[in-house]
Image: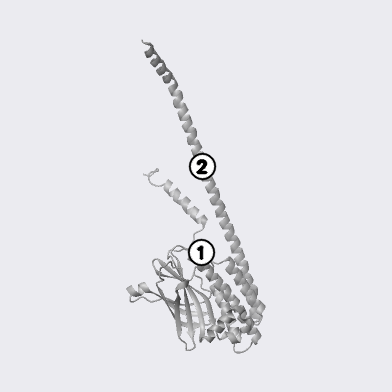
């Protein structure tokens, strides 16, 4: 055998002898890499599970604290504020406590429908303000100022929700100005400059049938439905400072919800009676409106936002989502093909 043939045979013998060892080494390396990868996946999954559990526990704790706080505020309002007001209707301090409690509720529970509480207290104060007898000018003025504070709180809550909805993709806000002249004529004007509809016209017409003290009786006519459906009936309702667009909204089309917010309402007859209790910043507005022959002035904002919007109170809890996912995974693992007949 030639020298070259011997070298090839020796090389082959060496490779043949080392083959099992090389294969074992490769398998070992691959095994280590696989185990390391699985460990990383397991660690990542564990971290996600820990984070999810922490967030779920945090949500549960937060809801528990908020529920306790809500119960305390609610009980304090009805156990003390209302009883005191019923025992002494002239007690302005008891009424102030009710306003304070509603302010706290609106600041901490902005997704809870507390509109009935606001409107009930507003009616109570309005009766005291305009009662034909029983109260002095000073008392009426104090009630008037307190009602103004109550309406400011309600307006701030409504505008806060409106601004949050306006940040959604596809949302648009348009402002309307409503005037009532001395002869009772009501005019509705759309303020194009205050619209953020990104060049898209709001396909809604507003009709105001009545204006009262802090209330507007309005109807919304959706031009698309009006044009295609002769039988379309415009939704009508009374709007106040306490309408919450998260809750008080109307679906006009499959892809559009509409909410209405009353942001300003002025009755110029209040200028002479309650000038001393009016905000000095508003006095000039009252005077200019009265001098122009306007008896009532209001501003409303209409927000259009996606019909599929889900409010905070309708969203599922994180714990419920986790439970649903776990049950779904269990169903998949025991589905057809795993021990089935």
What is the secondary structure assignment of the residue under circle 2? helix
Proximity of marks 2 and 1: CB atoms separated by less than 8 Å: no
- The residue positioned 54% from the left and 85% from the top of the image is 290
- The residue positioned 50% from the left and 77% from the top of the image is 299
Which quadrant of the figure has residue 3?
Answer: top left
- The residue positioned 38% from the left and 13% from the top of the image is 4
Q: Nearer the viewer, residue 329 or 35?
A: 35
Across and down, in percent, residue 261 comes to: 50, 73
Across and down, in percent, residue 332 comes to: 42, 48
Count the marks: 2
What is the secondary structure assignment of the residue under circle 1? helix
Q: Would residue 12 be found to the left or right of residue 97 on screen?
A: left
| Picture layout, residue 4 above or below residue 118 | above
- Which part of the image, by quadrant, shows the C terminus? top left
Q: Which of 65 and 287 is in front in this view?
A: 287
Residue at numbered disc 2: 42
- Which part of the image, by quadrant, shows the N terminus? top left
- The residue positioned 33% from the left and 74% from the top of the image is 227
Across and down, in percent, residue 62 comes to: 58, 59
Numbered badge on residue 3 = none
Q: Nearer the viewer, residue 276 or 165?
A: 276
Q: Rate crowding at label 2 as few (under 14), some (14 to 19) or many (20 or more) other CA atoms within 10 Å.
A: few
Residue 83 shows in this picture: no
Cα separation, mark 2 vs mark 1, equals 35 Å
| Picture layout, residue 191 above or below residue 269 | above
Which quadrant of the figure has residue 135?
Answer: bottom right
Residue 67 shows in this picture: yes
Residue at numbered disc 1: 313
Of pointers 2 and 1, the one earlier in the residue sequence: 2
Across and down, in percent, residue 8 comes to: 39, 16
Q: Would residue 106 be found to the left or right of residue 84 on screen?
A: left
């Amino acid at each position: 055998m030639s020298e070259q043939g011997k070298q090839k045979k020796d090389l082959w013998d060496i490779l043949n002898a080392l083959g099992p060892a090389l294969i074992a080494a490769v398998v070992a390396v691959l095994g280590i890499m696989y185990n390391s990868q699985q460990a990383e996946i397991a660690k990542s999954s564990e971290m996600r599970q820990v984070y999810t559990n922490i967030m779920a526990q945090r949500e549960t704790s937060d809801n528990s604290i908020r529920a306790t706080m809500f119960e305390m505020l609610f009980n304090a309002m009805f156990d003390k504020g209302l009883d005191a007001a019923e025992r002494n209707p002239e007690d302005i301090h008891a009424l102030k406590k009710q306003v304070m409690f509603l302010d706290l509720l609106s600041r901490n529970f902005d997704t809870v429908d507390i509109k009935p509480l606001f409107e009930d207290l507003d009616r109570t104060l309005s009766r005291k303000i305009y009662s034909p007898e029983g109260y002095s000018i000073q008392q009426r003025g104090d009630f008037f100022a307190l009602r103004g504070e109550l309406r400011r709180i309600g307006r701030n809550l409504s505008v806060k929700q409106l601004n949050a909805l306006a940040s959604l993709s596809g949302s648009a806000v348009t402002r309307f100005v409503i005037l009532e002249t001395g002869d009772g004529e009501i005019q509705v004007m759309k303020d194009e400059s205050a619209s953020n509809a990104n060049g898209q016209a709001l396909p809604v017409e507003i009709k105001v049938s009545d204006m009262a003290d802090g209330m507007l009786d309005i109807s919304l006519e959706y031009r698309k439905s009006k044009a295609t459906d002769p039988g379309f009936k415009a939704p009508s309702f009374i709007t106040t400072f306490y309408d919450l667009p998260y809750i008080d909204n109307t679906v006009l089309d499959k892809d559009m919800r509409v909410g209405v917010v009353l942001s300003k309402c002025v009755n110029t007859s209040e200028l002479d009676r309650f000038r001393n209790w009016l905000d000095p910043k508003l006095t000039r507005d009252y005077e200019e409106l009265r001098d122009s022959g306007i008896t009532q002035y209001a501003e409303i904002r209409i927000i259009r936002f996606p019909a599929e919007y889900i409010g905070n109170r309708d969203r599922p809890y994180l714990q419920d989502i986790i439970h649903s996912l776990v049950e779904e995974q269990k169903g998949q693992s025991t589905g057809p093909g795993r021990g089935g007949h």
